[in-house]
């Protein structure tokens, strides 16, 4: 027997990014520093492939969200790996955005004392730094800014404020950031900026994009002048540019899952003189939804849209609308409305009694809805969300779409406000309209309220858990703490591995369907309005095809997870 030369083991480039699975629609590119995040994000943006929906930078990762019908995950993985090392320095050629600031924050003096410096020195140091937008999240337009010249690791407040005003500038950990709208928050506030950080009517809507450089420009504290005596007939003031109208929605971002969503968005003035229908009673929650606004997660904007996308698409087809037309998502039923014109209407999704003018009608069948008649969608016996589509599509208020969609996002406040008694909806003139199909022989049936089997694809942080298989061995129960933001599951808590029991995970990009596990061990499945970044480890991700079924799971429904079959 002759000898042979041993074949050396393949060398692993320690500087190459680590590519982790993120369900059946994404990959998580993990690196070690924020500079590397920015380098990877810039490279992927420059070589972006067709089929990439989003590139979402975060503290130590970049989430690559793809449409598998156009770009398979193996092809996406190969494209990401082509870049090799991420040692390259980030270019300093990005434009500088200057934000005026008044250093008048309520935490400035106490924070300066804790750091052992004067308030004026803290303000001067903050203004002297050139900051870079590392990533966005928390709320649309909220940028996490970092600087190599910033030396302080600032702790968050022990008890977050329930109200942080729009424009407040804060510090937390090694970041600074400015709140685009009034929200709760736990950052230490050192100043205020009047800059228009986020405006749905602007292009782009977010002033601060990942990779942008930012300087804070101190301005004198404004002094209040005596109010002038008004003229007898004052002329109306000219409208300021759209960029100077930051969004003022104020959702309660700290509410627990299942709490009543709150959103203050557009008004309710209909297009046309009378509108198409008037809401008498919205039930538990009724919102305008379409197929959402994917592709804007890097700006902090969730896709939102119908929770049961297939049910809304079906409703639109049954009245001859384009599949992406807007309709009404009715949660748990109890919805009443009166037609203001002769309409054709259909209800799909969740299952319960439906009447038009007091006459019972079937779901999944288009019916005439005469002017003046009341439509009543009673409380659902099966499922959670019903979808009301009107031929021609629906619009609210000024009917202005944001990022190509009319969808109501209950977490961020984007889109129309949840419908209330008296709200008026108008026809959106959706086109092209198809003929209303004849009565279908499709065997429509109510959503299954028994044990649901939900397929899961791997998540990026399975290794954080002592026994990841327990996720699949347990029969979970949908808790009452469930809404469009997420579904909390009841069952035995999932334990972390001992070294990670109290570890903090830097924020990472998120997708609807991601199963986060907070420190208490109870899984939370993110919904269409869920945050675009999060700091809890994702153990697995609901497959895209299963999300619609999960949207109809009522509190008390039992779930069993299984591994998704390879595509």
Image: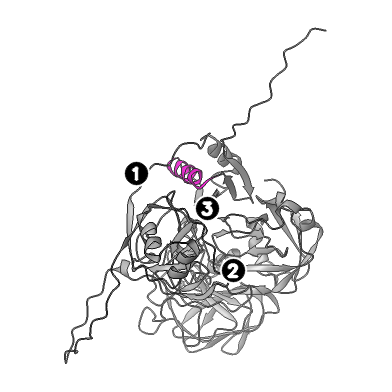
Q: Where is residue 345 in the image (x, y as percent from the top left)?
A: 53, 77
Q: In this rendering, would 230 be left or right of 252?
A: left
Residue that mark 1 sits on: 93
Magenta-drawn segment: 33-47
User: Could you say which disc has been placed on residue 269 in the image?
Assistant: none
Quadrant containing the N terminus is top right
- Please state which of the two labelled residues, at mark 2 or mark 3, is closer to the viewer: 3
Q: Is the magenta stretch mostly helix, strand or loop?
A: helix
Residue 31 in the image: state x and y as whole percent: 56, 43
Q: Quadrant of residue 245?
A: bottom left
Label whose residue precedes the other's in the sequence (2 or 3): 3
Q: Is mark 3 on a helix, strand or loop?
A: loop
Q: Name the residue under label 2.
A: 485
Separation (CA) of disc 1 from disc 2: 38 Å
Q: Against 507, is 434 above or below? A: below
The residue at the point 66 percent across, 60 percent down is: 516
How many numbered marks have been drawn onto this rendered protein structure? Answer: 3
Q: Which residue is drawn at 50% across and 51% down?
A: 57
- Look at the numbered disc 2 and give the secondary structure of its residue: loop
Q: Is residue 471 magenta?
A: no
What is the quadrant of residue 202 in the picture? bottom left
Nearest the camera: 301 or 343? 301
In the rendered view, does 346 fall on the left or right side of 494? left
CA gap between label 2 and label 3 equals 20 Å
**From mark 3 to mark 1, how far is it between C-alphas?**
21 Å
Please indicate, yes or no, whether residue 66 appears anywhere in the rendered image. Answer: no
Residue 58: mark in rendering: 3
Closer to us: mark 1 or mark 2?
Answer: 1
């Amino acid at each position: 027997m002759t000898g042979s030369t041993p074949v050396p083991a393949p060398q692993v480039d320690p500087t190459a990014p680590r590519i982790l699975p993120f369900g059946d629609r994404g990959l998580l590119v993990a690196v070690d520093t924020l500079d590397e995040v920015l380098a990877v994000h810039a490279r992927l943006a420059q070589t972006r492939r067709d089929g990439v929906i989003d590139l979402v930078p975060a503290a130590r990762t970049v989430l690559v969200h793809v449409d598998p019908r156009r770009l398979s995950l193996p092809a996406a993985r190969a494209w990401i790996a082509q870049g090799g090392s991420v040692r390259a320095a980030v270019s300093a050629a990005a434009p500088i955005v200057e934000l005026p600031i008044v250093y008048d924050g309520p935490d400035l003096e106490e924070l300066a004392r804790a750091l052992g410096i004067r308030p004026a020195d803290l303000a001067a140091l903050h203004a002297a730094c050139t900051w870079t937008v590392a990533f966005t999240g928390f709320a649309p337009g909220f940028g996490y800014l970092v600087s190599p010249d910033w030396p302080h690791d600032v702790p968050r407040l022990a008890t977050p404020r329930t109200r942080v005003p729009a424009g407040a500038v804060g510090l937390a950990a090694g970041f600074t950031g400015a709140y685009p709208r009034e929200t709760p928050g736990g950052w230490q506030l050192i100043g205020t900026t009047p800059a228009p950080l986020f405006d749905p009517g602007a292009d782009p809507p977010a002033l601060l994009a990942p990779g942008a450089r930012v300087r804070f420009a101190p301005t004198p504290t404004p002094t209040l002048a005596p109010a002038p005596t008004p003229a007898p007939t004052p002329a109306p003031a000219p409208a300021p540019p759209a960029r100077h109208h930051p969004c003022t929605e104020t959702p309660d971002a700290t509410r627990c899952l299942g709490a009543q969503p709150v959103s203050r968005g557009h008004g309710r003035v209909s297009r046309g003189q009378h509108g198409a229908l008037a809401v008498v009673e919205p039930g538990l929650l009724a919102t305008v939804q379409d197929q959402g606004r994917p592709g804007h997660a890097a700006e902090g904007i969730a896709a939102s849209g119908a929770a049961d996308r297939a049910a809304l698409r079906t409703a639109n087809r049954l009245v001859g609308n384009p599949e992406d037309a807007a309709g009404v998502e009715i949660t748990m039923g109890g919805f009443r409305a009166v037609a203001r014109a002769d309409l054709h209407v259909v209800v799909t999704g969740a299952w319960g009694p439906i009447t038009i003018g007091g006459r019972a009608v079937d779901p999944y069948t288009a019916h005439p809805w005469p002017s003046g008649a009341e439509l009543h969608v009673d409380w659902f016996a099966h499922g959670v969300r019903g979808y009301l589509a009107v031929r021609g599509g629906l619009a609210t208020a000024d009917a202005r779409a944001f990022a190509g969609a009319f969808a109501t996002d209950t977490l961020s406040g984007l889109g129309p406000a949840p419908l209330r008694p008296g709200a008026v909806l108008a026809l959106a003139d959706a086109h092209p309209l198809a003929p209303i199909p004849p009565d279908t022989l499709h065997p429509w049936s109510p959503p299954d309220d028994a044990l649901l089997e939900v397929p899961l694809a791997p998540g990026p942080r399975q290794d954080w858990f002592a026994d990841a298989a327990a996720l699949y061995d347990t029969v979970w129960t949908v808790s009452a703490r469930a809404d469009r933001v997420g579904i909390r599951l009841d069952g035995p808590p999932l334990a972390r591995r001992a070294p990670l029991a109290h570890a903090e995970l830097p924020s990472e990009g998120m997708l609807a369907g991601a199963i986060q596990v907070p420190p208490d061990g109870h899984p939370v499945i993110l919904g269409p309005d869920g945050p675009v970044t999060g700091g809890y480890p994702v153990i697995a991700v609901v497959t895209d095809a299963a999300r619609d079924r999960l949207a109809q799971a009522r509190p008390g429904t039992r779930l069993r997870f299984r591994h998704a079959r390879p595509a």
